[in-house]
Image (spheres, coloured by chain):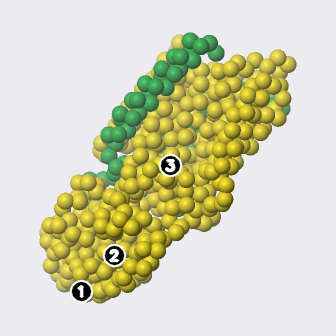
Chain colours: A green, B yellow
Amino acid sequence: MSIESLIILIYILVLASYLGFELIAKVPPTLHTPLMSGSNAISGITIVGALLACNELGYTSLSKWLGMAALVLATVNVVGGYAVTDRMLKMFKKK
Amino acid sequence: MTIAIQLAYLIASILFILGIKYMNKTKDARRGNILSAVGMMIAILATLVQIESVTFVEIIVCILLGSAIGLYYAYKVEMTKIPEMVALFNGFGGLASFSVALSEYFLKSGIDLPEIDGIASTSIILSVLIGGVTFTGSMIAFLKLNGSISGSPITFKGQHPLNLLLLIAFMVASVFAYMNQSDPTFMIILMVISLLLGILTVIPIGGADMPVVISLLNSYSGMAACATGFILNNNVLIVAGSLVGASGIILTQIMCKAMNRSLTNVLLGGFGQAVTSAQQDGPEIVVKEVGVEEAAMLFDSASSVIVVPGYGMAVAQAQHVIRELMEQCEKRNIDFKFAIHPVAGRMPGHMNVLLAEANISYDKLIEMDSINDEFPNTDLVFIVGANDVVNPAARTNPQSPIFGMPILNADKARTVIVSKRSMGKGYAGVENELFGYPNCLMLFGDAKQTITKVVSEMKDMS
């Protein structure tokens, strides 16, 4: 990777973190548990990396197996995280 | 084609940001979560088009397996066990980043001429460190929360120097791993150290501090995803990872503030082990008991009631009978609210979920800062399964370990009823002087049973 693309990635990191702080500070405490399980699901974005790591022919290499393990784990994280968050948010009702 | 893929990743990033923005309002939150899930779907599809079609079989098998486990757990888990689930899933996220980084390392270092440059190598090593710590740290948090290992802090002599030593060893091994890329020995050393560090940093932290730990590990899992983004030169991982990282850090700060502790103080661990002698020598607390009939009469004659729920309420499964109590009170036009302390429950916002599950409208759940001024004008405060968060010693006794912690001023109400199984102490291991106050009455017994009796007494009255 060139130093230029690294700088761009760092820009993205800094700006996205700042945006994250601004947005999340406004989330009401009532929703902190769903926020956490929902953001947990978002951190499952590693699934992108896992898919790319699986993209190798044959089953002989260690990196392929690691990629497949990562794929299962990240999928649990993504699917389970979004599902449980939805289940919780469905319960929040105003009467 | 690559432009389409990049655009798809951009759209996914925007949807993650919007998803979190919609979490700002309770009524929009569900839509926000769905938007975020759509973003994830787009990111996955944009990745799948880059993949060799012959590997689709194993990819589909892995995704189906992961989805089945995730869905099963998500729909089966009890709301009291959400903290365990979040801890476990955090750990999975960490392990996924850890595995992706290693996969990348073994792919590129396995060939004759290793091609990992300084930036990629640093990203891989960081991803292994953060991912490894997140994984084992979350597993320990999970085991502590579900009671498989004791919630009390595990400390030993030289614990902190050992952690420092391991960190230094990690840095040294990193340099060697970079210089000898074809030799996996150093990478294995890095793996082992990072997994060890996760265990060692979480075992000294007590069960009461787990809300802080889960929030922090949540942040780590985001940072691990970020590091993976640097390995793959992929923006969507960095955006998503930063959002999660920021979220975890904010929640960690909120939790620390609510317990009047610094993050360092929490992380060094050992809190709640030693009760200061000043506490133990204090005068014996003499309590007044109240029976269910009298309690029912107190509810009946009140014009305003605030319930202070604690995790003990959820353990006793009393939230549903509390809703019945609320219905009885509302029939009598009694103003009925809930006061929620930021650390009520076992993770940030946990109490709100438990009460929402019992069908209690979320506009009845009031945060500490908004409700604290209302206590002096309240006829009756009903404390169920909460202890430390209403202990006036936090305001009055500089000797108390919880001194300075923001509390709910329940003691200022005209009458206080405490539903409690016995005279046991709270998480912090501190006596609660509120129980001896003249306006405080103890309703001993299992919360669910006693409240059920109070409710049936009230039904008989009307």
Q: Chain of mark 1?
A: B
The answer, for residue B344, to whether it is visible in the render is yes
Helix, strand or loop at disc 3? Answer: helix
Choose between B260 and B409: the one closer to the eye: B260
Instruction: Quarter of the image for the C terminus of chain A: give it.
Output: bottom left
Please tell me how crowded label 1 is: few (under 14), some (14-19), or many (20+) other residues with Cα within 10 Å: few
Q: Please indicate, yes or no, whether residue A85 appears anywhere in the rendered image.
A: no
Q: How much space separates mark 3 and mark 1, taking CA atoms?
A: 47 Å
Which residue has dot 2 on it? B433
**Mark 2 neighbour class, 10 Å CA radius: few under 14, some 14 to 19, many 20 or more:** some
Q: CA distance from mark 2 to mark 1?
A: 23 Å
Indicate which disc, 2 or 3, sits on the residue closer to the N terminus: 3
Q: Nearer the viewer, mark 2 or mark 1?
A: 2
As measured in the structure, the alpha-carbon distance from the residue carrying label 2 to the one carrying label 3 is: 29 Å
Residue B66 screen position, x and y as percent:
63, 43
* Three-letter amino acid code at the position of disc 2: Glu
Residue at (81%, 25%) from the top-left corner?
B180
Question: Where's residue B108, x and y in %?
Answer: 76, 23
Tell me the amino acid under the disc marked 3.
Thr
- Residue tagged by mark 1? B294
2 or 1: tag closer to the N-terminus: 1
The residue to which callout 3 is attached is B264
